Amino acid sequence: MSTFKAPKGTYDLLPPDSAKFLAVREAIAAPLRGSGYGYIETPGFENVELFARGVGESTDIVTKEMYAFETKGGDRLALRPEGTASVLRAALEANLHKTGNLPVKLWYSGSYYRYERPQKGRYRHFSQVGAEAIGAEDPALDAELIILADQAYRSLGLRNFRILLNSLGDKECRPVYREALQTFLRGLDLDEDTLRRAEINPLRVLDDKRESVQKQLGGAPLLRDYLCDACKAYHEEVRELVTAAGVVFEDDPKLVRGLDYYTRTTFEFVHDGLGSQSAVGGGGRYDGLSEMIGGPALPSVGWALGVDRTVLALEAEGVELELPATTSVFAVPLGDEARRVLFAKVTELRKNGVAADFAFGGKGLKAAMKAANRSGARYALVLGERDIEQGVVQLKDMESGEQTAVGMNEIVAELESRLG
Ligand code: HAM
């Protein structure tokens, strides 16, 4: 064992569990690919100012959780704590919004970094699959994203998740609400830190998980009652479209998110089997973000689903993903001559699209058959000296145990037809 361990708050993805992560990423991406979203990849780090301005100077993410550093060249960078600001930065930089084809719909998958206190479901390095639809104000677009996330979770067999939906208003109505909330919060018995937060970012106080705070918030004014007519109508339309799609959600007038760029539609996907880190995904509309980072007005909406937590949610529900064995054929040579002949066959099988593996390391028959078993391969190919003389190879069906001799020149075609 090496003296090095994975850094605190991180973990390694190893086979066979890593296959689950791949399957989850694939399942989340599939509905996006089928709905006009194109794949985007951005760097793992950005100018720190992008997140400060985009995510918000006063958010926990920016003030406490960002891996910010100065490069040898003097650039102030940060490992990305989230994907939205980067994706929008990239879209603006490449002028994707000027092609006349709005919204620009993009999806991504990658690693994100937050210096949080690690616990089950909360890591310092985690993985998201996300989607952003940039440059259109249309309730159907918000609805599309909520429906696609629901579809992704369901395709994985996840059942016990809930969708929480809220509207955070816009630059017309939110300031009015903000003041009303501040006035209310000033009258409460809150500690100094919380009172300070109430002055800088009062909506975040609603999200305070402490019992002592929550019990005082019962009479807090709700944004719902302050929405302007345009926001109200927009939200009602989103609700109707999502409902019409048969997707069930809960109105949560207290839902606020940990990032400052949200306007109007906000939502979170929560799973009740996960304890305190119950949000498996979240998102919403961010109509002002583009201008906040120096771009033109580009109303947009998106979400990111946490891959780590989705895997935990599947485990909590006892869902076994159907992961087909990656190896179809496992070759077992007995002797040097057999190794040369069979290794060539394996290469030929692979060229023909058959997933094949080989008993490396000169194993004896028993150990090699054990390896064949472990590989999950449907068929084993065993080649001994006598088989070589006779120009055949033993084809063993690992399910039925049945073994037949097949001509060396016919074996590739035979396997192709058997594996369909
Ligand atoms: P977020 O709610 O900060 O939103 O993160 C989305 C998801 O990432 C969470 O629901 C959770 O599953 C996962 N996640 C976040 N932090 C951690 C962590 N420390 N450990 C494990 N999983 C974590 C965003 O990031 C927004 N960019 C979403 C968005 C896209 N809004 C609009 N477009």
Image (cartoon, grey):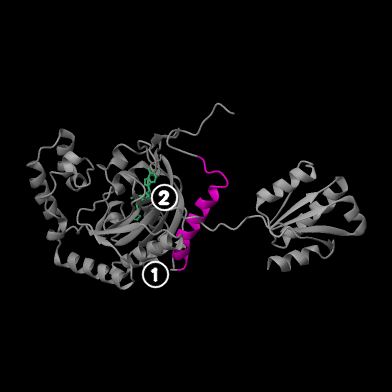
Amino acid type indicated by mark 2: Ala
Query: Looking at the magenta stretch, what is its main secondary structure?
Result: helix
Residue at image point 79% right, 42% down: 362
Q: Is label 1's Cβ within 8 Å of ligand 1?
A: no
Q: Please say if the residues under marks 2 and 1 sit with CB atoms less than 8 Å apart.
A: no
Q: If you read the primary sequence from the N terminus, does the residue marked by circle 2 or circle 1 appear first?
A: 1
Residue that badge 2 annotates: 316
Residue 28 is one of the magenta-drawn residues = yes
Q: Which percent across, then down, holds residue 117?
A: 35, 36
Determine whether the residue tagged by mark 2 lies in a helix, strand or loop: helix
Residue position for label 1: 101
Q: Position of residue 159 (x, y in %)?
A: 39, 59
In the image, residue 348 lies at what x, y percent?
77, 59
Between marks 2 and 1, how big is the CA–CA gap? Answer: 42 Å
Residue 373, label in figure: none
Relative side of 15 to 268, left or right: right
Q: Nearer the viewer, residue 108 or 15?
A: 15
* Above or below, comparing residue 94 to residue 36 in the picture: above
Callout 1: few (<14), some (14-19), or many (20+) C-alpha neighbours within 10 Å?
A: few
> What range of the chain is rendered magenta?
12-34
Residue 375 visible, this orientation:
yes
Towards the viewer: 269 or 54 = 269
Measuring 28% from the left and 47% from the top, which residue is drawn there?
Answer: 258
Question: Helix, strand or loop at disc 1?
Answer: loop
User: Mark 2 or mark 1, which is nearer to you?
Assistant: 2
Amino acid identity at mark 1: Asn
Q: Is residue 385 left or right of residue 21?
A: right
The residue most toward the top is: 3
Percent across and percent down for residue 277 are 34, 45
